[in-house]
Amino acid sequence: MAKGSADDYAEETSILTKISKDYIEDHVYISYVPPPLIRGKGVLARSEYEEWVGRINEIQEDLVWLLELPYHKFWSQFAFDGRVTALLNSYIQNTPRPYELEEFNECLESEIALSTKEAQDRVHALVLCVYIRLASFNEVKESKRLLTASEFGSLIYDKFIFDIPTICDICLIYGSENHLEVSHIVNTVFGQQPMYLNDLNEAVICATKSLKEIMQKSRDLDVSDSALLKGVVCMTPLLDIVNYLIDVVFSVSALLEFYSSACNMLVKYRYVSLLGDIYYNTVPLLYSHAGEISLLVQSGRVDSGKHSKVSRKLRILREEMLKTLNLIVAYFVSESLKFKSENNEDGVKRCIGNFLDVWYDCLPFDTFVRDYNKLYGAQKDFIVLKEVNSSEIESDKISFIMESILSHEILEKKSRHFPQPKNEVEILGAVGDVTEENIENNRVTRISDLELQCRISSVSDILPDVDVDVIRNYLSTMDYSTEKVIDAILKDSIAGIPLDEKKPMESEESYVNQRINVFDGDEFDVMTNDHIDMTRVNLGKKKEKYKDFKELIDDKSHRVEMADMYNRLGVVSEIDTVNGGVDTYDDEYDDTYDDTDVTSRKTFVTPRVLREVVLDSSEDSESEDSEGTSECGLKSNLNFVANPAEIREKMEQKRQAMRGAKAPVVEKDVIGKPKGTGQDQATVINRQRKNANKAGRANHQRKNRSLKKQQQGMF
C-alpha cells in the first residue's frame, strides 16, 4: 500500500511541469454581500437571515475547497478562472471596515445577530488564508516548485490577482489584528513584481484628484435657507462625501503602515497639503452643513441616525488624517537615522529635505498643525533631525519650522473653525454632535463667514466710525440682526458692551504722528518744524558755479582753504630766510660728489665732438687731394644722422642693379596653331607648364583661399 502510494505520488509530480487549464475544475462561486443588519436599520427579518446564512455557508465551503486544492490545481484555478478572484474581491469590497465595526456591533443584540457575526468571522478568516497562500508561491520544495519568482510576479500582475486597491483593502481590513501576515503579503507582492510601483504612482495621482473633486463638491453642496425651507437638502449627499473622504484617507493610511516607501510618492504629489486643506477648510464646512441640516432633524424630515453618523465619522476622519501625517513624518525621521548610521550623507540630506517639504505644506493650515502637535508632539522629531543634520542651512530651516509650530500654540487667533480642545485627550472629541439641546441655538452659532462679512459691511456702510471688531461683537450679542445693532448703536445703549469701544475718527495729529518716511524729522520737514532756513532752499533752476570745464580747472581757491590746515599740521616746510627769503632747495640736484674734489683727480677734457676743427698747415706738405680727403673724412665722422636724400638715391641704385641682373622675359607660345592642324612640341610643353604653375599668379586659388578663411572664422 505504501509502495503504491509512493508510485502514485511520483507519477503525479512527474507531470507537474507547468500550470495548465487541464487542472481547472468546474465550480460555481457565489459573491459575498453584507449582512442584512448592515443594509437595513438593525431590524433583521427571519427570511433575510436565512437567505444570507445560506449564501455565507456556500462561500465558506468554496473557500475551504480552494485551500484544500493541491499546489498546481490551486494556481491553475486562479490563473484561468476569473470567478475565484471575483469572489475574493466581492468580500474585500463589501465587508465592514474597522471604522464601521462600532456600528456593526451595536446591531448585535439578538441571538440571530450574534450568529450572523460568527458566520461573518469564519469567512473573514478564510479569505485571509487564501490571500496568504497566494502570496506564498514557494510552499513546496524547490525541486517540485512550478513557479519561479519572475513567473509568480507575472502571474499575479497579469491575472489581476493583486492590485493596488486590493492591497490597500487587505491592509485596512486585516492590518490591525494580523500585522505579520499582512506585512508578508505586501512585501511579497511589491518585492516580486516591480510593476506595482508604477501602479502605486498612478494610484496616488488618482487619490489626489479624487480628494480635490470631493472638496469642490463639498463647497457646492447647497444648504442655504431656501433649500432648507423647500426640503430639498437631505443627509445622503453629505454622508456620501464623508464616506468617500474616509475611504480614501483610511486606505492610504493603512498602506503606509505596511509599505512606508510610498511616503516618497505622497510627498512628490503634495498629498499632505491636500490633507491640511481638507482638515482646515472642508471638515469645518461639513460640520457647518451638518449643523444646518440638523434643523430638519427636529422637524422629522431627516433621519436622526444618519445625522449622528456624520458627526461621528468626521471625528474619525480627523483622527486618521493626523495619523497619516504622523506616519509620513516618522518614516523620514527613521530613514534619516538609518542613512546616518551608514554614513550616507546624500540619503540624510534627501530625507531631511522631504521632511521639511512636508511641514512647509502643513504650515499654512494652523488648525492642522496645532492639533497634530497636541496629539503627537512635533518637537521631538525636529530635535532628532537637528542632531542628525550637518548642514547649517538645513538647521536654520528646521529651527524656523519649529518656531512656526510653537507660534501656533502661543498665538490665539480668531478662527471660524471648530472649537479647539483643551487637552490631549479631548483633541479628537472637540467638536461634539449637534444634539437636541442646542438645536435652537444652532442657527445662530453656525452662521457662515461670508454672511457675517456681508452683515458687518452693511453696518459699516451706515456707521463708518464704529470699529469692525465692535460690530462683530454687537452682531453676536444681537442674534446677528443688523437692524437691531444699528438701532442700539444710534441709541447709545447695548446690553453688556460699553459704547466707549467705538473707534474714534483719526485726527490730523494722529495721522502726522503715524507718518513713516526716511525724511521725517529733518530740517526741511514742514510737518514738524515751524521755521525753516529758506536760504538753504533753492527755488527754480539751480545756477552752475562754473561756466565751463576750463574755468573749473583754473579755480585754485581750494589751496587757500587748505593752507591753514597744512600750517597747523606742519606739513609745509619753512621758507629759507638766509638767502633773502628765497628757497634754494632743488630736488633734481645730485649731491653725491659734493664732499669730493673731482678736478683734483682728473683734468677736464673737452669731448671731441665739441672741439673746433683746426687744420695745421705747417705740417708736412701733402697733396691737395689727400688734404681734401682727410678733411672730408673728418667731417663725415661728425654726421650722426645720414642724409635721407642720399639714402634714397643709394636704394634706387641698388634696385636698378638688381633689375639689370635678371634674365630677359621670354614669351612662351601657348596659343599654337589652329585647332585640327596639330601642335608642335614647344607649344604642348608651354601649355603643360602654364597649367601646372597657374596657381602662382592671377586669381586661380579662390577655392583654397575660401577654405582657409572658413577655417579661421572669417566668413
Image: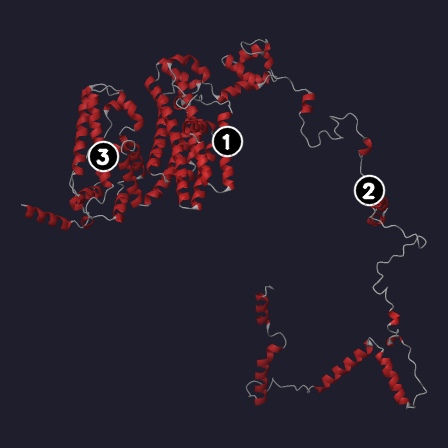
Q: Is 364 on the left or on the right of 114, as rendered? A: right
Q: Residue at the location (59% across, 12% down)?
A: 499
Q: Secondary structure at mark 2?
A: loop
Give the percent coordinates (x, y) of residue 611: 90, 76
Q: Badges 3 and 1: C-beta atoms under 8 Å apart?
A: no
Res 642 visible: yes
- In the image, taking residue 17 as reference, residue 398 lies left or right, namely right
Q: Are marks 2 and 1 in contact (CB under 8 Å)?
A: no
Kind of residue indicated by mark 1: Ser
Q: Which residue is mark 1?
A: 404
Disc 2 from disc 1: Cα separation: 58 Å
Q: Amino acid at mark 2?
A: Glu
Residue at position x 38%, y 31% in the image: 323
Q: Quadrant of the N terminus?
A: top left
Q: Is residue 134 above or below residue 654?
A: above
Q: x, y (%) of residue 192? A: 29, 45
CA–CA distance in space, label 3 to label 1: 48 Å
- Mark sitting on residue 127: 3
Q: Quadrant of the C terminus?
A: bottom right
Q: Position of residue 586 (x, y in %)?
A: 86, 58
